[in-house]
Amino acid sequence: MILVSGMEETMAGTYTQIYIQVIFAVQGRQDLLSKDWRDEVFNYMAGIIKNKGQKPIIVNEVDDHVHALWDLNPQ
């Protein structure tokens, strides 16, 4: 709030959007995620992000590493 001549005036609504990207890789960048269960791992990782009150955008593998991107809730 801004005080103007003893009166309270509220500022216009503010909007913040922060994205976090994390990249995971094992030592030697070995491709260890089997196609049989990699989707289960990605769903598990997205669930952890959701349980922390955040919004997962994508969790996926690119060759020898995993990318996780989520929208950070500032609260």
Image (cartoon, rainbow, N blue to C red):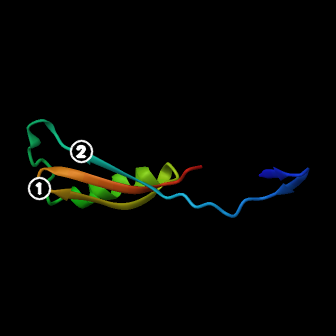
Residue identifier under label 1: 63
Position of 67 with respect to 53 (left or right) is: left
Position of 64 with respect to 50 (left or right) is: left
- Check disc 2: other Cα within 10 Å, few if <14, some if 14-19, many if 20+: few
Residue found 10% across the figure and 49% down from its top: 31
Q: Position of residue 25 (x, y in %)?
A: 18, 43
Residue found 11% across the figure and 55% down from its top: 63
Q: Position of residue 6 (x, y in %)?
A: 91, 50
Query: Can residue 37 be seen from the camera position used here?
Result: no
> What amino acid type is highlighted by mark number 1?
Asp
Query: Can residue 36 be seen from the camera position used here?
Result: yes
Residue extending furthest toward the front: 5
Position of 5 with respect to 16 (left or right) is: right
- Check disc 1: other Cα within 10 Å, few if <14, some if 14-19, many if 20+: few
Residue found 26% across the figure and 53% down from its top: 67
Q: Which mark is residue 9?
A: none
Among the 4 quarters of the image, the one containing residue 42: bottom left
Residue found 34% across the figure and 56% down from its top: 69
Element carrying mark 2: strand
Q: How many marks?
A: 2
The span from disc 1 to disc 2 (Cα, nearest Å) is 12 Å
Q: Position of residue 75 (x, y in %)?
A: 59, 49
Q: Nearer the viewer, residue 59 or 69?
A: 69
Residue extending furthest toward the top: 27
Residue identifier under label 2: 24
